[in-house]
Amino acid sequence: MDLSEVKHLISEPAAAFLSRPTHRLFIGGQWTDAADGRSFETLNPATEEVIGRVASAGPADVDRAVKAARAAFDQGPWGRMRPVERQRLLLKLADLVEAHAQTLAEIESIDNGKSAAIARAVDMAIVVDFFRYMAGWATKIEGSTSEHSVPYALQAEFVTYTRREAVGVVAAIVPWNFPLVVAAWKLGPALAAGCTVVLKPAEQTPLTALYLAELIAEAGFPAGVVNILTGDGPGTGAPLVRHPGVDKVSFTGSTEVGKLIGHASVDNMTRFTLELGGKSPVIVLDDCDPAAAAAGAANAIFFNHGQVCCAGSRLFVQKKLFDRVVADVAQIASALPLGHGLDPAAQMGPLVSREQMQRVCGYIDIGRAQGAQVVAGGGRQGERGFFVQPTVLADVQRSHRVAQEEIFGPVLVAMPYDDLDQVAAWANDTPYGLGASIWSNDLSKVHRLIPRIKAGTVWVNCHSALDPAMPFGGYKQSGIGRDLGKASLDAYLETKSVFIAV
Ligand code: NAI
Ligand code: MG
């Protein structure tokens, strides 16, 4: 394995982790090879060099992991733990992630391509805060009591109440754009609720979840409470979702795979939540400062190289400001320094994989072929690493594929609009409904627009702001259910109604 090019840029603990010959599966508290011995390589997308060999879990490993999670749920000390002890373990885990944040950020950067500085300041900060936030919910899970109104037993007396109970074994399937963040968004509420978990990271970015497994063990979570299976979708994810021992699936990824998972879940009546794709609008009203709106729009699409489910990928600017805002966004795009995630001067790194680079460049070509004008960027940068230039397309029609389909890269499509009725209709004119931002200081217009936008989150004068307490998820084909907030905890709990005749 050749780590020569990056080794001098990373700290000793990250280098030591990456030097391991094979990264193994974490099942029932033990590190183990795949039953059939298979493994796969993970790359540094900035250099295309191999940075690790990782075990590839098959159906036999899925079965072992689900059984370990089931045993931990039904028989182990976990099920008998008091909520305050689950809270303490989650707080301990947050402390450990904080202590290892630099190492985790470097590993995330090398595996995914994102800036290590941003991974530390944003991704790891989100993970730490979210574990702390969710730790608090472990001790605040409450049912309710009510006065009964049983209509056909007027002489009888009942005590009625509800209990919230952990749903059981959770299969968590996460993507490659925010590998550790999304893993935490599943683990936090599952563990606060008292569930056990089999987590499958994406095959492009398997490493930080494996590092986290060591911290989970160190924090003192009992064996089998969290199991980590690395592998791809068809080989590992599909058998995991179909396993009859799984009680709930929590998935973040493409709408296409989300639908497969929904169908498969219903066969076993497995509970599921899906956080899927988006084509989120950025709506600029003509009262606002065009320079500030342009800076916000650029950040909405270019953050994490556009590989963000709620990226602001469609820019609607009221006619008067259109040319000015688009010119400013194009200028910002052209000036963004691209580079290796460990290069402190780089503001944008490579896309995660050759496949993703080709998909994104393919969309830029489709845009051109349908008549879009490239006003910044326009394709791959360099010949080594999966870099794509920040790209702005104008002269786009709403029916164009680049205006309808999720590109999941640094590509913005810009369209002028006349009035609020028109932009409200256009903003909703895709199958998706994850997020939207409105840029204006006209309160009455903003408040009239917010209820008309079909999206799980609306931001005003900001985009992609996230808070541990604010639910995050999609309308329409952007998903079912919510991550974050108390809403995410509810998805890991069943409700049991109890009647006692007295
Ligand atoms: P994907 O949906 O195939 O992968 C996400 C996760 O699902 C990975 O862990 C993958 O191994 C797993 N998976 C794939 N097929 C599965 C199956 N049949 N059963 C169970 N698990 C399965 O996404 P992919 O192919 O990496 O990216 C394709 C497109 O999806 C992107 O271009 C983007 O548009 C969208 N996407 C959206 C994300 C989001 O945050 N909403 C994240 C990643 C991708
Ligand atoms: Mg990788």
Image (spheres, rainbow, N blue to C red):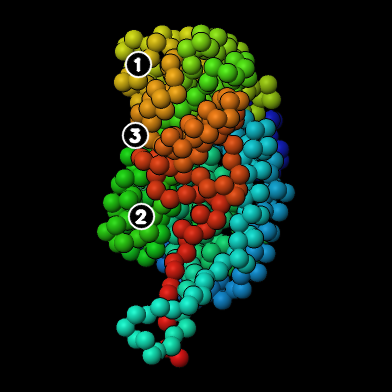
Measuring from the top left, give residue 268's x and y in whole percent. 30, 62
- Cβ of mark 1 under 8 Å from ligand 1: the answer is no
Measuring from the top left, give residue 363's x and y in whole percent. 37, 20
Query: For mark 1, what is the residue?
Result: 397
- Residue 465 lies left or right of residue 451; in this view the side is right
Residue 469 seen: yes
Residue 69 seen: no
Q: Which residue: 48% across, 16% down?
A: 318
Disc 2 is placed on an element classified as: helix
Of the pair 385 and 372, the residue shown nearer to us: 372
Of the residues shown, which amino acid type is indicated by label 2? Val
Query: For mark 2, what is the residue?
Result: 241
Q: Which residue: 32% across, 83% down?
A: 152
Of the pair 171 and 21, the residue shown nearer to us: 171
Disc 1 is placed on an element classified as: loop
Q: Is residue 394 above or below residue 255?
A: above
Query: For mark 3, what is the residue?
Result: 431
- Residue 155 lies left or right of residue 327; in this view the side is left
